[in-house]
C-alpha cells in the first residue's frame, strides 16, 4: 500500500512540475514581449544578477543611469524582480516565479475570478 501511495505522489509531483514549467515558459514569453522591448532593456534584464548595482549595470551596458532606473522601477512596482537595497544602491535579480505569478494573476483578473 505504501508503494502505491509513493508512486501516486511521485506521479502528482511530476505533473505539477510539468505544469509549472509550462506556466513559466508561457509567462516568460509574455514578459519578453511586454517588457523587454528594446536591446537596452534586454541587456539590462540579463544583467540583473543580484550582485551588481544599477550604476554598475549602467556602466557595463553603456546606458544612462536614469534610463535604467526608470526601467528597474517599472519592474519593481509590478513585482517582476527581486530587489534589495545596499546603502543607497539598488540591486535587482531575475525572478521567474514572480513573472509567472504576475501573468497568472492577470489571467485570473481578466477571467473575472
Image (cartoon, helix red, strand yellow):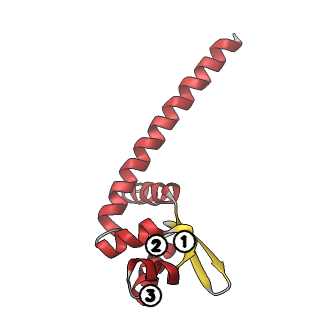
Q: Nearer the viewer, mark 2 or mark 3?
A: 3
Residue 92's label in the rendered image is 1
Q: Is residue 55 visible?
A: yes
Q: Are marks 1 and 2 in contact (CB under 8 Å)?
A: yes
Q: Which dot marks residue 14?
A: none
- Figure quadrant of residue 71: bottom left
Which residue is located at x 37 percent, y 59 percent?
A: 110
Residue holding disc 3: 65
| Residue at x 60%, y 83% (from the top left corner) | 89
Q: Quadrant of residue 82?
A: bottom right
Could you say which quadrant of the image residue 34 lies in?
Answer: bottom left
Please identify the residue farthest to the top as the structure is shown.
Answer: 1
Against 72, is 88 above or below? Answer: below
Relative side of 8 to 35, left or right: right
- Closest to the camera, between mark 1 and mark 2, is 1
Q: How many marks?
A: 3
Camera-nearest residue between 101 and 24: 24
Cα distance in 3D space between marks 1 and 2 = 9 Å
Q: Residues within 10 Å of mark 1 (few under 14, many from 20)?
A: many
Tell me: 45 left or right of 85.
left
On the image, the x and y values in percent for residue 90 come to 58, 80
- Furthest toward the front, the residue is 60
Disc 2 packing (10 Å; few <14; some 14–19; many ≥20)? some
Mark 3: give few (<14), some (14-19) or many (20+) Cα within 10 Å. some
Q: Which numbered disc covers residue 75?
A: 2
Amino acid at each position: 500500500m505504501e508503494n502505491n501511495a509513493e508512486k501516486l505522489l511521485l506521479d502528482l509531483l511530476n505533473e505539477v512540475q510539468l505544469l509549472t514549467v509550462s506556466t513559466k515558459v508561457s509567462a516568460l514569453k509574455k514578459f519578453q514581449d511586454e517588457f523587454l522591448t528594446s536591446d537596452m532593456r534586454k541587456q539590462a534584464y540579463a544583467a540583473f544578477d543580484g550582485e551588481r548595482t544599477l550604476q554598475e549595470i549602467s556602466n557595463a551596458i553603456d546606458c544612462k543611469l536614469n534610463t535604467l532606473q526608470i526601467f528597474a522601477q517599472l519592474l519593481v512596482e509590478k513585482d517582476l524582480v527581486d530587489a534589495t537595497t545596499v546603502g543607497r544602491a539598488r540591486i535587482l535579480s531575475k525572478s521567474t516565479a514572480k513573472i509567472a505569478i504576475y501573468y497568472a494573476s492577470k489571467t485570473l483578473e481578466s477571467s473575472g475570478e
